[in-house]
Image (cartoon, helix red, strand yellow):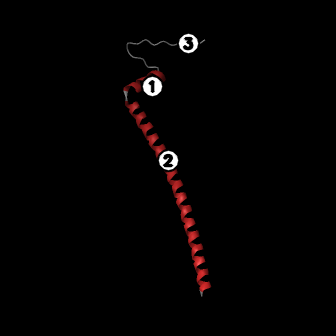
Amino acid sequence: MNRLGLILFILIIIYFIFFIRQDIMNNLELKQQIQRVTIDIEQGNERDHYLTDRLNRLQGDRLIEELARTRLGFVKKAEKAYKVIGR
């Protein structure tokens, strides 16, 4: 009877060792997922700030004027436009 109790005790210990080991592995996996999600959130926040800043600049008159001048060649009424011809 004593020997059967010892074997049963050892089997229970082995079971708990494997059970705890699996929990530890799951815990480590979850920590890695948390790190990945945290990085994704930080990158999303950075992108959000960039896009918000860009939207604010696009709504301003200075950027619209600059884009009209550089991309479309617009000039103000009192200005003279010069076209540089390359060699």
| Residue designated by label 1 | 67
The count of marks equals 3
**How far, Cα to Cα, is label 1 from label 3?**
22 Å
Residue 85 is tagged as: 3
Q: Amino acid at mark 3?
A: Ile
Residue 49 locus on image (x, y percent)? 42, 38
Crowdedness of circle 3 by 10 Å Cα count: few (<14), some, many (20+)? few
**How far, Cα to Cα, is label 2 from label 3?**
49 Å
Residue at the image point whose x is 44% and y is 37% from the top: 50
Crowdedness of circle 1 by 10 Å Cα count: few (<14), some, many (20+)? some
- Secondary structure, mark 2, is helix
- Secondary structure, mark 1, is helix
Instruction: Give the mark toward the camera: 2 or 3.
Output: 2
Image vertical order of residue 72 relative to residue 49, above or below: above
- Tell me which numbered mark, 1 or 2, is placed earlier along the sequence: 2
| Residue designated by label 2 | 40
Image vertical order of residue 20 relative to residue 1, above or below: above
- Tell me which numbered mark, 1 or 3, is placed earlier along the sequence: 1
- Secondary structure, mark 3, is loop
Whether residue 17 sits left or right of residue 54 in the image: it is: right
Instruction: Give the mark toward the camera: 1 or 3.
Output: 1
* Furthest-front residue in this view: 2
**How far, Cα to Cα, is label 1 from label 2?**
33 Å
- Tell me which numbered mark, 2 or 3, is placed earlier along the sequence: 2
Residue at the image point whose x is 58% and y is 78% from the top: 9
Q: Amino acid at mark 1?
A: Leu
Crowdedness of circle 2 by 10 Å Cα count: few (<14), some, many (20+)? few
Instruction: Give the mark toward the camera: 1 or 2.
Output: 2
Residue 26 locus on image (x, y percent)? 54, 62
Q: Amino acid at mark 2?
A: Asp
